[in-house]
Image (cartoon, grey):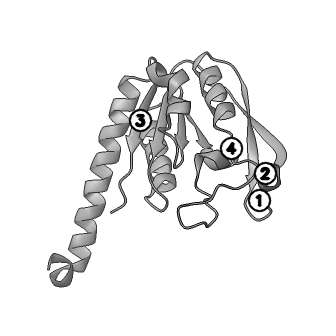
Amino acid sequence: ERCRRDPAGFVAECEQSYTNVIESVAERICENRCERMILLLNGPSSSGKTTTARRIRDAIARRGVESHAISMDDYYLSRNTYDVPKDENGRNDLESPLCMDLPMLSNHLAALSKGETIEVPTYDFMRHIRTGETHEVRLEKGQIAVIEGIHALNDVLMAKVREYSMGVYMADG
C-alpha cells in the first residue's frame, strides 16, 4: 500500500533503513578490527552481497579503516578439473561448495589472520577457468578483509578463522 501511495518515499525509507544497517555493521567492524580482522559476508545468490560488501568497505573507509575485498567467486575450480555435482533433479549444481577450492580459501584466510601475504586467484566465468593470474593481499594491523560469497560461513572456512572473523548473513528479500 505504501509503495502505491508514495513510491519515492517508500524507496527513500528503505534506502535509509539499509544505510542505517550498513553504518551499524561498519561501526561494529571498526570497533573489533584488531581482534576480528576478517568479515565473512554470506547469503544466497542475488541477495546483495557484492553491493553490501562495497558499501561496508566505503563505510569503514569513512572511519579511516582500510580494507581489502576478496570475492569467493575467484576460488571456483576450473570446470574441467572436477566432476560437477548434481542437484536433487539431476542438473548441474554450480553453487555447490564442491565447485570451489574451500581448503585453499580457508588456508588463505588463516594466513591473512597471521599477517601473511596471500595470492588470490582470478576466475574467468566466461571460460569457466582459473586464469593463473593472482593478486597479492596482506592485512596490516587494523585493516579488514571483506570476503563475500554464497559459502562464506561454511564450516570448512570458519574452522581456521572463527576467532578472527565476523559473519554477516544477507537474507534475500
Looking at the picture, tell me which residue is in the foreground, 162 or 56.
162
| Whether residue 163 is situated above or below residue 25 in the rendered picture | above
- Three-letter code for the amino acid on which mark 1 is drawn: His
Task: Label 4: state its secondary structure.
Answer: helix
Tag 3 near tag 4, CB within 8 Å: no
Percent position (x, y) of residue 133? Answer: 83, 44
Dot placed on the residue nearer the N-terminal end, 3 or 4: 4
Specify few, some or many for label 2: CA neighbours under 10 Å numbering under 14, 14-19, or 20 or more. some
Q: Disc 3 marks which residue?
A: 167
Q: Is residue 101 left or right of residue 41?
A: right
Between tags 4 and 2, which lies in front? 2
Residue at coordinates 46% horizontally, 27% vertically from top-left?
Answer: 165
Q: Residue furthest right?
A: 132
Percent position (x, y) of residue 42? Answer: 46, 45
Specify few, some or many for label 1: CA neighbours under 10 Å numbering under 14, 14-19, or 20 or more. few
Tag 4 near tag 1, CB within 8 Å: no
Dot placed on the residue nearer the N-terminal end, 1 or 3: 1
How far apart marks 4 and 2 lie (CA) works out to 9 Å
Q: Disc 2 marks which residue?
A: 78
Quarter of the image that includes the N terminus:
bottom left
Quarter of the image that includes the C terminus:
bottom left
Q: Disc 4 marks which residue?
A: 75
Dot placed on the residue nearer the N-terminal end, 3 or 2: 2
Tag count in the figure? 4
Q: Is residue 166 left or right of residue 11?
A: right
